[in-house]
Every structure is written in structure tokens, then in C-alpha cells.
Image (cartoon, grey):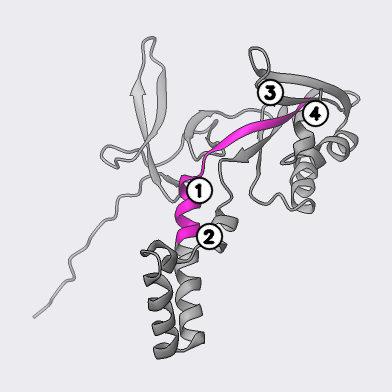
Amino acid sequence: MYNAAKATRTVQIFEYTNRKGVTYYLHAHPRRGGTTQYTLKRSADGALAELPAGYEVVENVNGQVSVRRFRSRHITAEEEAEVRSSLAQRGLDAYRSEVKDAQITIFEPDRDPDEFAAEFDPFDMMPAGIGEQVKAMARERFGDATLEEYLTERRERLRQRLQETTRYSPVMRFRLADRERRLFEVARMTARGEGGWHVLDILPLAAAVKRYVKHVGRDSFFELI
């Protein structure tokens, strides 16, 4: 007697997972004139198998994703790395930088997930006096090592959740103003007057980064005029 295994076919679809862990699927929508609009949705029903040639998926610092026609790069990889390296050197790990068209923008988080999580103690959430008693009992029963392992795990879970919900706002921008000489217009976000971008200088990127990134996240940032 011959037993043939039942063949199954897996349908492949295009999917994209953003930095917050949310997965999106590619969909097509006909438009007037015979063109097609491509979007990303959470539903896999009716999703396409692949991204059409000439299109790319873009994601901003807040995890919002979209599909657009491929664009040529105006900012070099070295220039992008220049800004990222400057943020890291100054301990601004919670900040983000984003390249869009001919500009590099630095974004500030509404909170620092690492700093907030590092100070988190679940026992502090209990009523006054009770938290310390419960913590002391747990330390006596399970030992320091086990208690610290528990706290580390809770803090890491909190840090991950905070990273998923942290919002970023633009604070400084380097816009390519002269492609031949690679000069960048430096501007900072301001709330003065009608608000918006306030231009500070036009410099080569290395000099601009050295002069201005050091003020990000400091009181001196508001003195830049």
C-alpha cells in the first residue's frame, strides 16, 4: 500500500516589521488614470507577494512606515555616520537621527527609556512601608542574586515597552545647501514666535556637527540664536 504525503503550498507574501515590532503587509490600490498606489497595512488578507521594482519601504523615527518610489541618495553614508557618531560620543544614545532627501535631522525622545528603566523598582509601586517590607522578605527568602535577577528582568521588560511607545520630536537639522562644496545649513527647532526651524549657520558638516551637536539636550541649546 502506497501512502503519499499530502503536498502543501505556502503562499509567500511581502511583510515588513518596524522598529516597534509591528508587522505590516503590502497592498495595492488602483487609482484613476491606471496607476497603482501601494500601502502597508497590518492585515495580511489580499497582501502582495513582493515589492514592485522601483519602490522602497521607508520608516521614520516614530516607527511610521510607507511605500514610495525609490529616490536617489543626496546624503552620503559617511555624512550620516558623522552625525550618529557625534551623538554616541556625547552620550546621547536616546536620541535618533534620520536622513530624508537632502537633510539629516536629530530627534529628541519624550523620555529616556534606558534611564527610566534603570531607576524602576516594582516595590516602590506598593503602598508606603509595605514595599520595603516585601522587598526585605524576598531578599531573605530568595537571596540577593535571585532578587537582583528578578529586578533586572523587570527593568528590561519595561525598557522594551518604553522603546515601543517613546515619541521623538525634531530638534536640530543639517540641510545640504551646496552640493558641490558640501555645505550644510544648520537649524534648530524653536518655539519662539510662530515656532519652527531657526537657521544658525552654513558650514561643512564636520564643522557644523562639532560646533552644534554638543548643545543638544543641554540648557545651552536654547541660547543658540
Single out the residue that lies furthest toward the left: 1
Q: Check disc 3 and report the residue beneath it.
A: 190
* Three-letter code, disc 1: Arg
Q: Residue at x 48, y 31 (%)?
A: 67
Q: Check disc 4 and report the residue beneath it.
A: 223
39 above or below 45?
A: above
Between disc 4 and disc 3, whose residue precedes? 3
Between disc 2 and disc 4, whose residue precedes? 2
Specify whether 220 is left or right of 161: right
The answer to whether mark 4 and mark 1 are in CB contact below 8 A is no
The label nearer to you, 1 versus 3, is 3
Between disc 4 and disc 1, whose residue precedes? 1
Between disc 1 and disc 3, whose residue precedes? 1
Between disc 2 and disc 1, whose residue precedes? 1
Q: Residue 173 magenta-drawn?
A: yes
* Three-letter code, disc 4: Glu
The answer to whether mark 1 and mark 3 are in CB contact below 8 A is no
* Three-letter code, disc 2: Ala
